[in-house]
Amino acid sequence: MSGVPLTLADISDLRAYERDRDAFRREVIEAKRLRRVAIGPLVTVVFENRMTMRFQVQEMARAERMLTDEQIQGELDVYNPLIPGPGELSLTVFIELRSDSELREWLPRLVGIERALQLRAGSAGEEDVVAAEVEAAHERQLTRVETTASVHYVRFSLGAQTVGKFRRGPATIAVVHPAYRHESVLGDATRASLAADWDEQPHRR
């Protein structure tokens, strides 16, 4: 079931994770292949779920050699809020800039981009338009008046009617910002992958 937080019991210790890591990493990469969507030339979003957040925590624990429950719980406290609940979509938003000059040019221009994302669900003329909500704890860390960060975390909360339209399609993800206006239609396989999060029961590896 979507929205169920990860607990310490969901996170393997380092030796066990090392044994399973290659297979789990392949599973996550395949899932993200459908869940990664480019919106124009500079913005990419990844639709997160319980599995991708578990992978994030496992990889952080591996990289930092975290051995205590307290350390792992700290990571869970950071990433659990990014697990989408029923009828929600949770996204990591990446501003894809590859040089210092691009960073200096675009990050000041794109202030507020995290609040400029829209999800549109339904046929033309009957679309529901849902505005992005910014994850509060991350907003305090990432939002600045004069410049923006290259990574943001946002959420869309869909009512029952919009969920139905999303499942049937079409659905579009858009950035509507004074300095950047682009959109992408979500493919059928992507919509199916995202809608499946609302139906799944959590499982432990």
Image (cartoon, grey):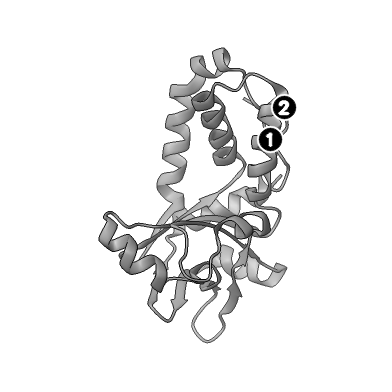
Helix or strand or loop: what does disc 2 sit on? helix
Nearer to us in this view, 114 or 2: 114
**The disc labelled 1 sits on which kind of residue?**
Gly
Residue at 68% across, 49% down: 81
Q: Residue furthest front?
A: 146
Q: Residues within 10 Å of mark 1 (few under 14, many from 20)?
A: few
Residue at 71% across, 67% down: 160
Q: Are marks 1 and 2 in contact (CB under 8 Å)?
A: yes
Helix or strand or loop: what does disc 1 sit on? helix
Which quadrant would residue 155 be assigned to in this image? bottom right
Which quadrant would residue 157 be assigned to in this image? bottom right
Q: Which residue is mark 1?
A: 74
**The disc labelled 2 sits on which kind of residue?**
Glu
Q: Residues within 10 Å of mark 2 (few under 14, many from 20)?
A: few
Res. 193 in view: no
Q: Residue furthest bottom?
A: 125
Disc 1 versus disc 2: distance between alpha carbons?
Answer: 6 Å
Residue at 39% across, 77% down: 181
Instruction: Pinpoint residue 43: horizontal percent, then vertical percent.
Output: 39, 62
- Looking at the image, is 68 positioned above or below residue 93? above
Q: Which residue is mark 2?
A: 70
